[in-house]
Amino acid sequence: MLDDLRNSASHSFIDDLPINEPDGVKKDGRIFGMTAPQRFLVSVMLLVMTCAIGALLLIAFGKVSL
């Protein structure tokens, strides 16, 4: 780890970073390592879970009756 400390201090780590890629976006169109159908499925699952939890809370607090 510390063997090449002097040589590694001579160049900046910013040189190793890609310049034209935004954070989280790769060149193959993946964001966070997921393809578009996978991101869609995750967003639909989050929507369903939010609706289900909201409905259960409304029933639990007695604002809605079955």
Image (tube, rainbow, N blue to C red):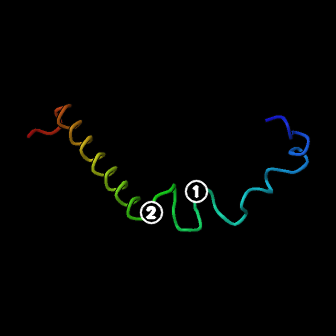
- Residue 25 occupies quadrant: bottom right
Front-lying residue, 66 or 14? 14
Quadrant of the rendered structure where residue 41 is? Answer: bottom left
Residue type at numbered disc 1: Gly
Residue 40 image position (x, y, % from top left): 37, 61
Question: From the viewer's perspective, is 1 left or right of 23?
Answer: right
Residue projecting furthest to the front: 3
Query: Which labelled disc corresponds to residue 24?
Result: 1
Give the SS element for disc 1: loop
Q: Nearer the viewer, residue 46 or 26?
A: 26
Residue 34 in the image: above or below residue 64: below
Locate residue 22, reporting x and y percent. Answer: 63, 61
Label 2: state its secondary structure: loop
Q: Tell me the amino acid under the disc marked 2.
A: Thr
Disc 2 designates what residue? Answer: 35
Foreground disc of the pair 1, 2: 2
User: Residue lying farthest top?
Assistant: 61
Residue plotted at (86% across, 45% down): 8
**Left or right side of 29 for 60:** left
- Residue 21 horizontal/vertical position (percent): 65, 64
Picture layout, residue 27 above or below residue 54? below
